[in-house]
Image (spheres, grey):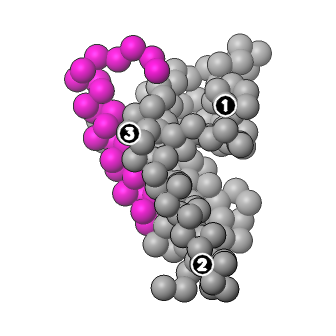
């Protein structure tokens, strides 16, 4: 994890808790519980959560939803001065969108050993061949973010074993 001050750490925790709230919205819809918020000037300017299943869209990731909302809020495609908080390490698609949107900082909770492209499988955000490399901070509320995923997939496996879909409660 990058070295951060105590006051910065408490702000990161505050905003990650907002991302976790978004992840819980996804979970309530039977979606993989991943949430994101984008903060600029100490205010949330955008929120997003996974909607891949409900919207039948491969691009329905939390980060993409938040970036699109932030673009509308800012009336610009460049999100300089913004920080993205996301509960799970971004995938290659989301890492690409982060680079292209010029987000200054990415803070994520849990690592994704099967699809993460901010250190797990590769690190697209630090590749100096791109014209933008955001600062990355990892491990904020890592245990809580990991537990969201673990509990979701455990419940999903139990429901599949019982012959039910995840949406049936």
Q: Residue 31, image x and y in percent?
A: 57, 67
Q: Do the residues labelled 3 and 2 touch (CB within 8 Å)?
A: no
Q: Which of 70 and 39 is in front in this view?
A: 39
Magenta residue span: 1-25
Above or below, 11 relative to 17: above
Above or below, 143 relative to 78: below
**CA distance separating discs 3 and 2:** 27 Å
Residue found 51% across the figure and 40% down from its top? 110
**CA distance separating discs 1 and 2:** 29 Å
Q: Residues within 10 Å of mark 3 (few under 14, many from 20)?
A: some
Closer to the chain start, of discs 3 and 1, is 1
Secondary structure under the numbered disc 1 in the rendered image = loop
Secondary structure under the numbered disc 2 in the rendered image = helix
Q: Residue 157, image x and y in percent?
A: 63, 70
Look at the image and say whether residue 152 sits in the magenta stretch: no
User: Which secondary structure class fits the magenta region best?
Assistant: helix
Residue found 57% across the figure and 37% down from its top? 111
Which mark identifies residue 120? Answer: 1
Q: Residue 105, image x and y in percent?
A: 48, 27
Q: Which of marks 3 and 2 is in front?
A: 2
Image quadrant of residue 25?
bottom left
Look at the image and say whether residue 19 sits in the magenta stretch: yes
Residue 16 appears anywhere in the view: yes
- Residue 33 shown left or right of residue 46 in the figure: right
Closer to the chain start, of discs 3 and 2, is 3
Q: Which residue carries the number 3 mark?
A: 141
Q: Which residue carries the number 2 mark?
A: 159
């Amino acid at each position: 994890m990058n070295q951060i001050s105590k006051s910065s750490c408490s702000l990161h925790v505050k905003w990650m808790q907002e991302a976790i709230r978004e992840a819980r919205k996804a979970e309530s819809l039977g979606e993989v519980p991943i949430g994101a918020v984008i903060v600029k000037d100490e205010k949330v300017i955008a929120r997003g959560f996974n909607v891949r299943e409900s919207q039948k869209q491969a691009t329905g990731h939390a980060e993409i939803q938040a970036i699109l909302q932030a673009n509308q809020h800012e009336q610009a495609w460049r999100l300089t001065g913004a920080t993205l908080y996301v509960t799970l390490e971004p995938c290659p698609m989301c890492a690409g969108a982060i680079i292209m949107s010029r987000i200054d900082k990415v803070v994520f909770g849990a690592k994704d050993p099967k699809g993460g492209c901010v250190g797990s499988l590769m690190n697209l955000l630090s590749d100096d061949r791109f014209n933008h490399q955001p600062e990355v901070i990892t491990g904020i509320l890592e245990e809580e973010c990991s537990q969201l995923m673990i509990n979701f997939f455990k419940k999903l496996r139990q429901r599949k074993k019982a012959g039910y879909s995840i949406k049936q409660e």
